[in-house]
Structure formats: C-alpha cells, structure tokens
Amino acid sequence: MNKAIRQAVIAGNWKMNKTRPEARALISELIPLVKDANCGVVICVPFTNLETALDATKGTNIKVGAENCHWAKSGAFTGEISAEMLAEMGVEYVVIGHSERRQYFGETDATVNQRVRAALDSGLKVILCVGELLEQREAGITEEIVGMQTKAALGGVFAGELKNIILAYEPVWAIGTGKTATAEQANEVNHYIRTVVAKLYGAPAADAMTIQYGGSMNAKNADELLAQPDVDGGLIGGASLKAADFAVIVGAASR
Ligand code: PGA
C-alpha cells in the first residue's frame, strides 16, 4: 500500500450552515490560508451557496462541491436537485450517502448507488460516505456494514471511473459528537475498505484510491489521523466552518 501515490483531499462539509454573505466571508478568509496547500481542498456547501462559492473561489485552489444530488436527470421530484444541474453550474464534487442523509432522509444503499451512478454520468466527482452506527461497532460488525455499504454503492461503477470517487469512512458515532475514532480505529477501517476495493477492482486501483476519514476531525487531532498510512485526507464538518481550523487541517494534510 503506497500512500505516496494518492492525493490527500481535505473536504469541508458545511451541512445546513451559512447564508450567502456568511459563505462569502468564510471563503474570503479561507483563500489566503490554504493557497499553498499540497493537497486537494474542497468545500461542500448548501445548494443556495453554490453560486456564491463558485464565484468566490474562482482562480483559487479551492474546489466546490454540493452535499447531495438526485439520481434522475429531471422530472417530478419536488425539492430535489439533479447531478446535471450541478455539473452545468461548474460544481465539481458531490457528497453522496452521508450518514445524516441515511439516518434522517431515508437514504438506502440502493438510492446511494443510484445517486453515485447519476453523479458519475454527469461528470461530477463523488465523495462517497460509509460508516457504522455505535451499536454496530459494539456488535462487532463494523467491517460487514462498511463492506456492504461500499460494495452496494459501487455497484455498476467501472474501474476507469474510480478516479472520480473519493471514499469517506465516517463512523456515525464520531460525527458531530466530539468523539473521534482513534487514529488506529480510523486506519483499521480505512485499510479494510481498501481491501474491499482491491477485491472488486484489483490492488492497483485500491492503492490509488483516496480514502478519507471523517468524524470530529479538528485542528488538534488532524495531524495524528492524517499520519496514518490508510487515511488520505478528511471530510470535515464542524471544523470546516472556521477558516483557521480548516486551514490547520489542510496544513496537516499537506505535510
Ligand atoms: P464533524 O462532521 O466533523 O462535525 O464530526 C463530519 C461529517 O459529518 O462529514
């Protein structure tokens, strides 16, 4: 397993936060702090902030992502946004299968797979989230759950498309709770996910895959988590709402 061949990516997941003026202010603050990053830098923002974010990051090294997309191209799906609509705007990334979507909005492995397919077909890059609940970890079935989520989400995805997918391991019990997985726990599951990808697509494809960790990663613990051999960046919720903290994490991934 060769970490050197993979690009680390730090992606902010703003969730349902920031009005447009607040978004513009946060991005202005962030731009100079991350301009020399030696890793990918992405901010995934609410749909209402996409245009603002695209405009504010023009000519910088910060890429913009959405937090979800629908699987259909268009149609009678009130309240939904298609992958094609995002791609047309110039959005590059989309988060799919976040545990909050799975928990609160009825997202299933099947709909995650459909959304992944639609995003790839529209030319978007996918940040695909998987992760176990606390009771699943306690029952000793973390690998089964995460393996199944990964395989189901990648159904129908060709090897050549993997370069457009980043996997994000996010243990649900660590999201927004301040309870980070230990660096060893994060690395162990990230490594397991890589073996699942290797079984599906072969070792070289798995070696090249960026696999992030997410769940209470912050300015204090980022160094240790990102130093792990199978942790290739992070998906950052709370800490992505503070420019200085997010920049420290980007700095840690750049080393
Ligand atoms: P957190 O969120 O960093 O606030 O725990 C991570 C995520 O949900 O992507």
Image (spheres, helix red, strand yellow):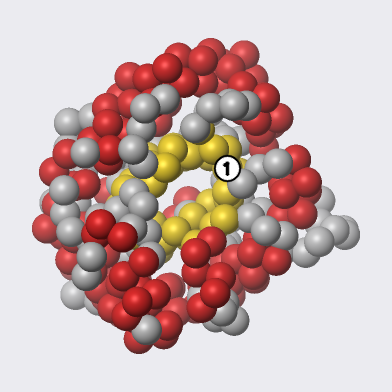
Q: Residue at x 53, y 27 (%)?
A: 60
**Quarter-of-image position of residue 149:** bottom left
Residue 193 visible in rendering: no
Q: As drawn, is 103 to the left or to the right of 138?
A: right
Which one is in front, 133 or 211? 211
Residue 25 in picture, x, y percent from top left: 53, 13
Residue 34 in picture, x, y percent from top left: 39, 26
Q: As drawn, is 31 to the left or to the right of 111?
A: left
User: Vertically, is 169 above or below 88?
Assistant: below
Which one is in front, 119 or 204? 204
Identify the image quadrant of the N terminus. Answer: bottom left
Residue 225 visible in rendering: yes
Residue 88 in picture, x, y percent from top left: 78, 46
Q: Residue at x 41, y 85 (%)?
A: 200
Residue 250 in picture, x, y percent from top left: 32, 34
The residue wearing badge 1 is 65
User: Vertically, is 19 above or below 102?
Assistant: above
Q: Residue at x 34, y 38 (%)?
A: 38
Identify the image quadrant of the C terminus. Answer: top left
Q: Residues within 10 Å of mark 1 (few under 14, many from 20)?
A: many
Q: Residue at x 44, y 38 (%)?
A: 41
User: Vertically, is 119 above or below 61?
Assistant: below
Give the SS element for disc 1.
Answer: strand
